[in-house]
Amino acid sequence: MFEVGGFRSALHGSVSRRAFLTASAVTPLAGTAAARPAARARSVIVLWLWGAPSHLDTFDPKPNAPAEVRGPFGTIPTRTAGVRFTELFPKTAARSDRFALVRSNVNFDGDHLKAGSIGLTGMLEGKDAEVPNFGSVVARHRGTADLPAFLAIGRGHPRDVVGPMKGYGGGTWGRNFDPFLVGCSPAGETDVPALRLLDGLSPAALDDRRRLLGELDRHARDADKWDAARRRAYALLTAPEARAALDLTRERAPTRAAYGHTSFGQSCLLARRLVEAGVPYVQVNWSQYVEAMTPNCDFGWDTHIFNFDLLPDRHGPVFDRVYAALLDDLRDRGLLDTTLVVALGEFGRTPRINGQASRDHWPQCYFSLWAGCGVRGGTVVGDSDRTGAAPLTEPVTPGMVGATILELAGVDSQARAELRVLPGQRVIHELF
Amino acid sequence: MNSSDPVRLTTDGAAKFDPVVLANGDIVYGVLETAVQTRLLRLRPGATPVKLHPEATTSEFEATFTADGAHYAFVQSRGNLNLKLVIREAATGKDAVFDPGGGFAGVRRPSFHPGGERVCFGAPAPTGQDIAVVGRDGRDRRTLTAGGINNWPAYSPDGGWIAFCSSRDGTFDLYVMNADGTGVRRVIALDGMQLRPAWAPDGRRLAFTWNRGGVYEVHAVNPDGTGLRPLAAAAERSDYPAWTPDGGAVVFVGERGGASDLYRVPAE
């Protein structure tokens, strides 16, 4: 079922092309480039593990470290010789030949909101919202005629209990380059929040073609209400291919089951459908809030307490199932050659277990997973020291993460220079 | 369908946690009701689940009851990364609260002494995580363990023992100790972590979750480590075992087809 704003709508397949064209003609959905280099990554999926997973308890365990570092989880072999993960990730371990693991990521701030902004923009200026998200860059460079070029799946703007992440969207390029938000429930019901605030929009209006066109025309004349997000929302509603992509009920039941009936699982399935439909950049947010166990927060990875209870209870099994399903699904559909999948958080967690039997923030060393688009499966890029405190090899910075994503997405160094993003940052060529 | 096949007790598929079967056969369990709230539900066999605390506006977890059902305890999310232990008199709704302090602090996985005198739980400590115990009034906190990450305590039906899991010897393994914290011994040595022990009503078997070869399964073992047998094993997760009052079956949370539901399986 496709949910629009606060209600569900059974959209008619007969909504006319004119309606979509009317909506999209008011303002282009995204910028378009006259001449683009070929993009190896037709699409990018970023799995944003908001709140920061512990690298030691996931993909960079230290089984020979002292007890106050190694934690209580056993380790298991992977399909990559000599590489072990913790026992929470057996499905991921069984597919390690299909992705590369970076164990030497670093960030430059220990605050979630700032590190998140730096992590998603690649630049220190990101924390002040002065530079664009990687997805915004792709959206500006690539654009699409029919669909938002940068789509985020999640509950809302990423934040913590203090406030929202500043550098998440288009930065100084403006809100036109912010991600277009779509929600997805554990049952796979999708939701377009941008439509919630439109006066006069009702299920009846959406069910009636003429009334819908009237609404479009009325809102098109009302510049204040007719912002980019809402234009794109209407375009989504009226483009048959977009509606189809957002409707998970069209998916085979075994496929939906493979991802699991969790919000993250169905969100990743939705991401795959959007990639199939041609969306260049999809960011799936694990949660809106970083906090793991806080009233009104949605169980992020910020496990300052009960890290060793939460990870085997929820976070580990959910991620393991979903990541494995996504890799399988993309491969089986022949999409992995043209889709880059990157999974990472904003930093890692302290090597030494804290006084709450958990781990705190650690931007000095963490992990990322890379798959698709020629990334050499089974590769481990970089290494960390014996306690996971620091990289032993050249640190992989957020700028390098961004340069690699953008390069594969067709935003080459010349284009990045023209756009003034990620100057001087190198691609992580060790991935290929 | 084979008589030993699990019987599905719920059908909504929402994420579920920590069922406990009461003396009258009702099952109290946690469910992820919304993206931001877990809620305790009470399921009477054959009926629709009802909210245990309809007024709850914050996440609640891990209910545990005295043998007579007169009191129960549960964990409540009351602040930013802060979890309190609520001990409630069922008839009056009168609460005692054990507050582990401000800031990032909490307790988890409580187990009510069957006689109702005490509640034990997992509590973080500077040296790892301990099993600690408080009186029914939430006072007189005492620590029962030292060293390692200790969690998922469960009082035996006679109140004389506590089963729990601990990393004291490396990774999470299954242990028992006297209820005063003495006489700790490992029940069994297995590859793969063990979680969430639950005593059979006669105290002669322990059901527990075992991460066996990468899949969470429910097994049972005698407290002396003999008689290991699988109770619920599938390609997907089986977790959170709880015995029925007659000891004839175990209720667990099964992930099947990607959906999470309660199941009941014969105990042997």
Image: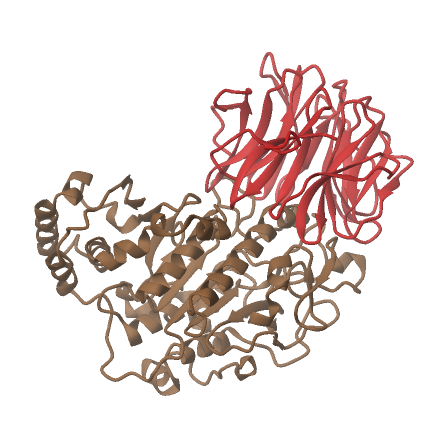
Above or below residue A398? Residue A115 is above
A377 left or right, relative to A86: left
Residue A290: give x, y in percent of width and height. Answer: 51, 52
**Relative to residue B165, is residue A166 drawn left or right?**
left
Q: Is residue B208 visible?
A: yes
Q: Is residue A215 above or below residue A91?
A: above
**Residue at the top extreme of this rendering:** B91
Which colour scheme appears in the figure?
Answer: by chain
Q: A174 or B219: which is nearer to us?
A: B219
Residue A163 in view here: no
Q: How many marks?
A: 0
Viewer-proximal residue among A119 and A96: A96
Residue B144 in percent (x, y) is at 83, 36
**Which of B241 and B173 lies nearest the eye of the viewer?**
B241
The reply, left or right, for residue A298 in relation to residue A43 is right
> Would you place residue A230 above or below residue A261 in this image?
below
* Quarter occupied by residue A277: bottom left
Residue at the far bottom: name it. A414
* Picture residue at 70% right of the left edge, 62% below the top: A351
At x 73%, y 67%, the residue is A387
Q: Quadrant of the N terminus of chain A?
A: top left
Give x and y (percent) for residue A401.
49, 74
In the figure, the shade used to draw chain B is red
Q: Quadrant of residue B184?
A: top right
Outermost residue on the right side: it is B183
Q: Nearer the viewer, residue B35 or B92?
A: B35
User: What colour denotes chain A?
Assistant: brown
Query: Which percent across, then down, holds residue B187?
Result: 85, 40
> Which residue is depicted at the point 68% across and 49% down?
A308
